[in-house]
């Protein structure tokens, strides 16, 4: 009789594993396009309908799957300065072919899938990869805009590269595209399950690096909005590292439409840890001489993410 496998399949490590959360409110300083579908020659942005006490409203949306894709590409296209190639080229890991290897710094957290035995070319060397599944331990959430501002529709034209030609067959092709309006705010959340600090380095790098690349086409880019936190202008950013989830999750209800209410709710939850309101940007709880929960807020959270991102550069890219 065949033995039943009862383990997770995750390789054992001498590094401790934790859960990590990232919470932030992002702002788009310009119009953005997040493609959804095309209707009657109009490129539509993705929206969601939200039921409130009085009505059903429609809001613009940065879907978690779109953020995930941008983050993954940030890792695949990360430069290796010593060799002049990209990380994905070195690993033979890309999209749609993910290597799904447990030692891959990308697939180890984001997951990967090979449906059948496949021969791949990695920097000129052929290798065979068997069917493999690596379940991602990073999930994304949020992305529903706070303000109920409808997408704007604008006329665009795809121009040929020639400045002037008499051939009328290459005239500009007009089309219409919707855009999310500037200054929309998007609460977003990333959650990592049972990862080491070294594995989380890739998540921190991808989160920060992707901020300048969110959006389809041009323009692109968002930033973490700054508001008053402990009477100092700081980014609305929270990073948790924990064994026990002892802090309130600063998740904003999609039904909220007022910026002031959303920011107040975010700050209220961010500053509530294990039954009391904290007054510092770093809070740690220990049990039996072991840290079971740490929360970084504002500038401390940004610096912590930057430290993890730098760790990814020094241990993987350099």
Image (cartoon, rainbow, N blue to C red):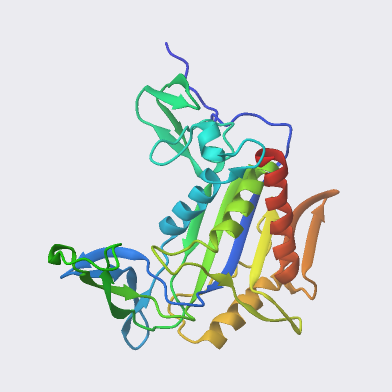
Task: Name the residue nearer the viewer: 19 or 313.
Answer: 313
Q: Position of residue 296 (x, y in %)?
A: 73, 64
Res 255 quadrant in image: bottom left
Q: In the rendered view, tell whether residue 313 sits above or below residue 48.
A: above
Q: Point out the residue furthest to the top here.
A: 1
Residue at horizontal 42%, vertical 22%? Answer: 130
Q: Point out the residue furthest to the right here.
A: 289
Residue at horizontal 40%, vertical 25%? Answer: 131
Q: Position of residue 95 (x, y in %)?
A: 41, 41
Res 104 quadrant in image: top right
**Does residue 81 appear left or right of residue 58 in this picture?**
right
Name the image quarter holding the N terminus: top left
Task: Name the residue nearer the viewer: 128 or 79.
Answer: 79
Name the image quarter holding the C terminus: top right
Total residue callouts: 0
Residue at horizontal 73%, vertical 32%? Answer: 14
Q: In the rendered view, tell whether residue 103 sits above or below residue 243.
A: above
Residue at horizontal 56%, vertical 31%? Answer: 102
Res 129 quadrant in image: top left
Task: Name the residue nearer the viewer: 303 or 237.
Answer: 303
Q: In the rendered view, tell whether residue 88 sits above or below residue 207.
A: above
**Does residue 54 appear left or right of residue 43 in this picture?**
right
Q: Position of residue 196 (x, y in %)?
A: 67, 42
């Amino acid at each position: 009789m065949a033995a039943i496998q009862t383990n997770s399949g995750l390789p054992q490590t001498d590094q401790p594993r934790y859960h990590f959360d990232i919470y932030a409110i992002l702002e788009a300083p310009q119009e953005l396009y997040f493609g959804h579908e095309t209707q009657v020659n109009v490129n539509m942005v993705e929206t969601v309908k939200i039921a409130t006490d009085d009505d059903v409203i429609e809001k613009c949306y940065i879907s978690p799957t779109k953020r995930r894709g941008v983050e993954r590409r940030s890792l695949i296209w990360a430069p290796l300065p010593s060799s002049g190639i990209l990380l994905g080229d070195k690993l033979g890991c890309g999209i749609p072919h993910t290597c799904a290897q447990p030692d891959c710094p990308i697939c180890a957290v984001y997951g990967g899938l090979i449906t059948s035995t496949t021969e791949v070319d990695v920097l000129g060397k052929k290798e065979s990869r068997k069917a493999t599944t690596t379940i991602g331990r990073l999930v994304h959430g949020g992305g529903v805009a706070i303000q109920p501002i409808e997408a704007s529709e604008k006329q665009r034209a795809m121009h040929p590269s020639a400045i002037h030609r008499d051939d009328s067959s290459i005239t500009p092709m007009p089309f219409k595209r919707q855009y999310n309006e500037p200054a929309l705010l998007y609460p977003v959340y990333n959650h990592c399950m049972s990862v080491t600090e070294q594995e989380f380095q890739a998540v921190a790098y991808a989160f920060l690096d992707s901020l300048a690349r969110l959006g389809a086409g041009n323009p692109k880019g968002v930033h973490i909005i700054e508001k008053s936190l402990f009477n100092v202008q700081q980014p609305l950013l929270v990073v948790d590292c924990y064994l026990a989830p002892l802090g309130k999750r600063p998740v904003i209800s999609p039904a909220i439409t007022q910026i002031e209410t959303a920011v107040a709710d975010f700050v209220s939850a961010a500053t509530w840890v294990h039954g009391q309101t904290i007054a510092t940007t770093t809070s740690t709880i220990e049990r039996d001489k072991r840290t079971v929960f740490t929360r970084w807020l504002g500038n401390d959270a940004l610096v912590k993410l930057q430290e993890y991102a730098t760790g990814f550069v020094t241990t993987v890219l350099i």
